[in-house]
Each structure stands twice: as structure tokens, then as C-alpha cells.
Amino acid sequence: MGTVNVLVSPERSMEVLSRLEVNRLLDTSESGLHELFRRCSLAVLNCGSTEDNSKAIFERFRTFDIRVLQQERGIQLELVNAPAGAFVDGAMIKGIREHLFSVLRDVVYTQFEIVENPAFDLLSPANITNAIFHILRNAGSLSPQRDPNLVVCWGGHSISREEYDYTKEVGHELGLRGLDVCTGCGPGAMKGPMKGASIGHVKQRLTGARYVGITEPGIIAAEPPNPIVNELMIMPDIEKRLEAFVRVGHAIIVFPGGAGTAEEILYLLGILLTPDNKYIPLPVIFTGPRESAEYFAMIDAFIAATLGPDAQKRYRIILDDPARVAREVRSGMALVENFRAQHNDAFYFNWLLRVDQDFQTPFVPTHENMAGLELQRGQAGHRLAANLRRAFSGIVAGNVKAEGIRRVEEGGPFRISGEAEVMAPLDRMLSAFVDQGRMKLPGTKYEPCYRLAD
């Protein structure tokens, strides 16, 4: 892929920055924002990439740079050695330009209005939730005028053609019913539902449809925003990304995936198993084509063996029936709407949902932290779910995130240990992910970044 040098102007947002903000974006020191901004910008410019190794992507475009130019009438971005695939006949693709300035918006706002704002104590659960609300509100993604209709779709970036086509069929059924879609914004099961929904929306002559993508700096290069996303948000870390999903979504659909999807499932079940959330409705459906029956049987068995029947009650498995999935989602949303109306909770942000600090504190996947995870029964179900979620978060980091890959290269595979009754089903599921090619994109030889203790 070739590269280009170009100046880009914003179309509708972030037209003015302070001198301090510009200086921090240009600052290449550890306290500056330049490297964070550069990496996230490269990711959105690399849309359509078939590579899911962040470290390799950054190395391939190591000469790429981005600079903010302050001018009297606003700002411009100077791109040096940018991926040529982001341009058509010398002009940047409009959607990619929108994503580029979404990166700028969120990097600047998060740093100056959240991280460096003494009003936000990011060690407090309530303040973390408040910070997520402010980031989403600043992005214009909270819509008080809309009734509940946002479906969060999770699933892997490395899935089979049959599974991908099925995600499109489900998205199509959602679109025909006027439902909007929110995903992790990348390829595979994150792109398919949006693509299908866009056709359904067109058939129904619906305008203003939302295709919401929520990502974070560690994963964005491995899963660059797909071109259908028209609302892109970059949250500061994976924990805030996951909380954003459950706060803004009115139903959740889980398609087949790998370690990242397992992390999302465990996060969600941990939240729903928290005692204060027992009666809060949130429709959750696991679904795929008939070819995915064995996959979901494995997921269900893992949940039964580790978290037990209470966790199994919080989701339904529907195979090979896109229309039924959409109908179940629509009927479940009616319960969500009634519940929130009765309890005076916002339709656009689920304030009543309790998210404990175990699910909010950023987990740094070092060898020491991975080895120290408490993976045994005897603790509350939501706490075991939190620790299992951290284990999968570390595996995702070792698979696709630049910093995680570097740690594994330097220190060897992460060591994970725990009670045999937990480790055995964990081993079976991870082995199946490897055998089914769910850890990396097709055509890539997978070298495990983890080792389960005997």
C-alpha cells in the first residue's frame, strides 16, 4: 500500500483548539498526546486492513505522522505518509475524515476534561460512570428524543463466511424493524450487523439511522472502524468501553467470536449477576447459523461449569433464525422501556445499572497480574466473572494489542492458574478457539500468548 502527504480540514467538528491543546498534541514526550493521537489516527486511516496485529501495523507505517496546524479560522491536520487507501483521487474518503476528527475530539476531550479535571476522581465508581457519560455526551451520542432502539452486537473479527453472512441477515431483520446498531466498530461480526441493518433501513425509507462504533486505543489498530460507522467514540480503556456498551444499549446480541467475545460475555454476565441488578431487564441473545451450534454449546457449558445456572438464565440461545432474534429483541426492548419509565431512568443512558469497581478498574495484563488472578469457585459469581474477564482481556492483549504483544515477546506467554474445576473448562474453550481459527485472522498461524498451569 502506498502513502500520501496531505492537509485535511474538519467538516463539522473540532474546528478550534487552544494553544495548550495543540502543543500537547504535538508533544512527543511521555506526558504529551502525540503518540496516542498518531496511533489512533493511523488506525482509522488504515480502514479495510486485513492485519490484526497492532505492533505489525505500527511498524509498517512507522514513518506516518500527523500534525495539528493552528490557523486563524480553525485547524488543519497535516498527514505525512498516510495510507493511500484512505483516499480516492487524492481526496480523503468522507467517512474516514469524520472518523479522523472523532479521534481528535475524543483524545483532546478525555485528556483535558476528564483525566486532568480534578472534578473526576477516576478511582470512584460513580465518577467513572459519570466520566463515561460526559465522553458520550460530548460526542453527541446521547439522544434523549429517541425511544429505546439501540442493539449492541458483539462477536469476533475472525469468523467464518457462514457466520459473517448470518450477522448480516440478523442486522437486516433489525433494520427492517427500525432498530439501530452499536458494535465494537471493527470487521467481521462488528461490521456484518451494520451492513445488514443499512439495507433494512433503506427498504423502510428510514433516515437518521445510527451505526455506533465504540473502541479504545489499545484495540483500534487491530480492529479499525468499518466504513459504515457514522458515530465513532474512542473510550480511554477497555473497561470504560465495555461499560459504555451496557449503559447505552437496550439489548445485546452475541455472535460467535474468540477471546474478545468471551471477555465481553463474562463482563456482561458479571454485571447482570451483581445482586443490585437482579431485576433490571436487559435482553441478551446468543445467536449464529446452524454451523455455530457446537460453538454456543461450548460457551453455555463453560458458563454452567464456572458461573452456574443463575448466569445461564440471563441469556437465550437462538440458532439459525434471524427474524426470531429481531422479534425477541424488539419485545425485550418494550420491557426495558416500561421499566425505565416506571423507575424514571433515562432511555439513552442506563443510570440504574450498578457496575462495581471490579469491572471498572483498568486491568494491566502484565505477567505478574495474569499469574495472580483468582480463578476459583467459592467467591460470588460476579467476582469470578470479573476475574475470568481479566484473564481473557490479557489474552486479547497478547494476541492483538501492541503493548501486550511486546510483553509476550519479552517475557514469554502469560501464565494463568487456578482451581481445576475452573481451569479445565477454560482450557477446553481456549483450545476450541485455537482449533476453530478464532484467535487470529484466517491465514495467520497462531502462537498462544498464554500457558495454563498444570
Image (tube, rainbow, N blue to C red):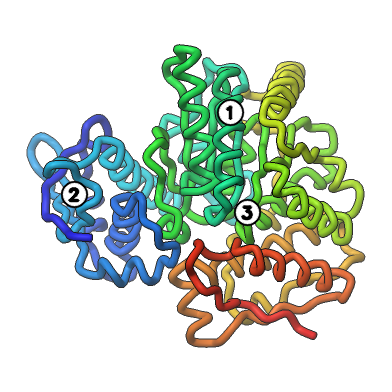
Q: Quadrant of the C terminus?
A: bottom right
Query: Residue tagged by mark 2?
Result: 19
Distance (Cα) linking label 2 and label 1: 38 Å
| Residue type for callout 3 | Gly
| Residue type for callout 1 | Leu
Mark identifier at residue 40:
none
Secondary structure under tag 3 reads loop
Mark identifier at residue 150:
1
In the rendered view, does 202 fall on the left or right side of 126?
left
Q: Residue at x 59, y 33 (%)?
A: 248
Secondary structure under tag 2 reads helix
Q: Residue at x 63, y 44 (%)?
A: 126
Pair 2/1: label in front: 1
Q: Residue at x 29, y 42 (%)?
A: 96
- Mark 1 Cα shell of 10 Å, populated few (<14), some (14-19), many (≥20): many
| Residue type for callout 2 | Arg
The one of 212 and 51 positioned closer to us in this rendering: 51
Q: Quadrant of the N terminus?
A: bottom left
